[in-house]
Amino acid sequence: MESITTELLFFLMAVAAVAGLVDAIAGGGGLLTLPALLWAGLPPVQALATNKLQGSLGAFSASIHFIIRGDILRNNLWPLVGAAFLGSAGGALMVQYLPNELLRQIIPILLLLFSLYFLFSPRISDEDATQRLPLGWFALALCFPIGFYDGFFGPGTGSFFVLAVVVLLGYNLTRATGITKILNLTSNLAALLFFALGGHVLWELGLLLGLAQAGGAWLGAHLAVRHGAAIIRPLLVIISLAVSLKLLLT
């Protein structure tokens, strides 16, 4: 925290609030917060770890809203939650053993790839459809690997979960978004636990940013049933591409 100026802290909190709103509506808030933390000078593993702390608070805030609304089928979530937790724990453990310089090269490339994903990803429906995969197989085939990705890197996880739940479980967009918040909260907490055990979390900074992200997520959850993603997605892509290019060129 000593190297974080007051102006930079307020900037990071503003980014966190916007990311919370974006994540609750369209997913992908980590595409804003992770580059911002790297831009602020945090080493890659510390940036990933601190991002999990603020992301956990944001996901918790949005989850509470969806639970209150009744958009989450709580009795069906345990296999999915367990798979997401185990996958994320594995990803968080693996990333801690990679050299910082390798991570500095990998992360901007991943950000570019997932910025392009958001740019070209298909639109998803807000109508229920036919379930294509049983919950058990869905947990193994999708929740575990997406959880692993979240523990290893993270940005875009919410959108992957939403697309998977809509396409393979047949839930409408609103319900899928609610379920995704629970799964994203689970994978964030699993990764946070193992990053904390490794001593990589900047708690003071992460809690301040997390409170800002939770406020944005609460607002975003209220707007999730509208069409905010149509406006947010282009902004998300532009910012992510700009920051990714900046990281690659420095």
Image (cartoon, grey):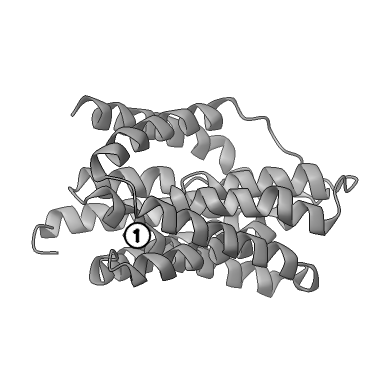
Report x, y in % for residue 214. Answer: 44, 66
Report x, y in % for residue 179. Answer: 69, 60
From this viewpoint, is residue 92 visible? yes
SS state under label 1: helix
Residue 102 sits in which quadrant?
Answer: top left
Residue 155 higher or lower than 117, as above or below: below
Residue 6 sits in which quadrant?
Answer: bottom left
Residue placed at 13% from the left, 58% from the top?
4
Residue placed at 79% from the left, 73% from the top?
75
Q: Residues within 10 Å of mark 1 (few under 14, many from 20)?
A: many
Judge from the rendering whether residue 249 lies leftward or rightward of residue 51; answer left or right. Answer: left
Judge from the rendering whether residue 249 lies leftward or rightward of residue 226; answer left or right. Answer: left
Residue 94 higher or lower than 194, as above or below: above
Residue 82 higher or lower than 112, as above or below: below
Residue placed at 58% from the left, 63% from the top?
86
Report x, y in % for residue 124. Answer: 72, 38
Near-viewer residue (167 or 119): 167
